[in-house]
Image: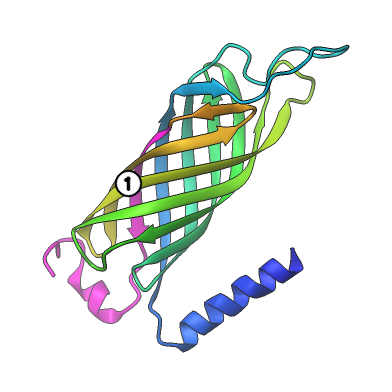
């Protein structure tokens, strides 16, 4: 963990010193997560109360992600989310990474990777926690330099199950220069 933190700090420092433009970004997203498949089979023993999501529930998520966008190509952030799988509530905490293929274009395709932890208050006392990871691809529409909307899909693995989430996001970039701030919200043209 310490090596990872040091490596990330070095990466950010090198990006800053090499003239990289960093935009601090907030992303609010909602996701509908249709159930795909159960990934494990359990040979039931004493105390087993069923699978973590025992009725093949579809899910809903509401997430808030804060991070930094580097050179309009790469985004790294930390996210906190509320999860609801047809009445089973929980939360997720994760790191979020995105790679954008084009710079400063209105429509920009991207790849997404999230890695983290989810906890559900299900039939087990104290609930169940598990790792979660998702891989996705999407497209982002830049309305202004500081406001964008995106849609993405892919797959999510968590709580012994596979899901196919569809995410809708609002992305808010903090202005980094006086020029961007002066343009204001009505400056859709570049």
The segment highlighted magenta reads 165-190
Q: Badge 1 local density, few (<14 within 10 Å), some, or many (20+)?
A: some
| Secondary structure category for the residue under label 1 | strand
Residue shown at 64% from the left, 29% from the top? 159
Return the x and y of residue 98 as percentages of the image width and height: 43, 57
- Indicate the quadrant where residue 70 lies: bottom left
Q: Is 23 positioned to the left or the right of 161 in the image?
A: left
Q: Is residue 178 above or below residue 25?
A: below
Return the x and y of residue 151 as percentages of the image width and height: 31, 42
Residue shown at 52% from the left, 83% from the top? 14
Give the number of marks: 1
The residue under label 1 is: 138
Residue shown at 27% from the left, 52% from the top? 140
Q: Is 12 positioned to the left or the right of 136 in the image?
A: right
Q: Is 75 positioned to the left or the right of 138 in the image?
A: right
- Indicate the quadrant where residue 82 lies: top right
Q: Is residue 77 above or below residue 134?
A: below
Magenta stretch contains residue 57: no
């Amino acid at each position: 963990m310490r090596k990872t933190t040091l490596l990330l700090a070095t990466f950010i420092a090198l990006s800053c010193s090499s003239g990289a433009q960093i935009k601090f970004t907030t992303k609010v997203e909602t996701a509908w997560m249709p159930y795909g498949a159960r990934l494990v089979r359990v040979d039931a023993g004493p105390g087993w109360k069923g699978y973590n999501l025992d009725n093949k529930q579809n899910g809903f998520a509401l997430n808030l992600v804060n991070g930094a966008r580097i050179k309009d190509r790469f985004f790294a952030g930390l996210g906190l989310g509320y999860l609801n799988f047809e009445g089973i509530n929980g939360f997720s905490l994760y790191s979020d990474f995105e790679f954008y293929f084009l710079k400063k274009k209105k429509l920009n395709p991207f790849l997404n990777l999230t890695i983290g932890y989810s906890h559900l208050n299900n039939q087990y006392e104290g609930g169940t926690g598990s790792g979660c990871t998702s891989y996705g691809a999407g497209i982002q529409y830049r309305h202004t330099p500081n406001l964008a909307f995106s849609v993405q899909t892919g797959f999510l693995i968590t709580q012994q199950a596979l899901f196919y989430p569809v995410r809708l996001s609002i992305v808010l970039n903090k202005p980094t220069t006086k020029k961007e701030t002066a343009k204001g919200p009505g400056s859709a043209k570049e």
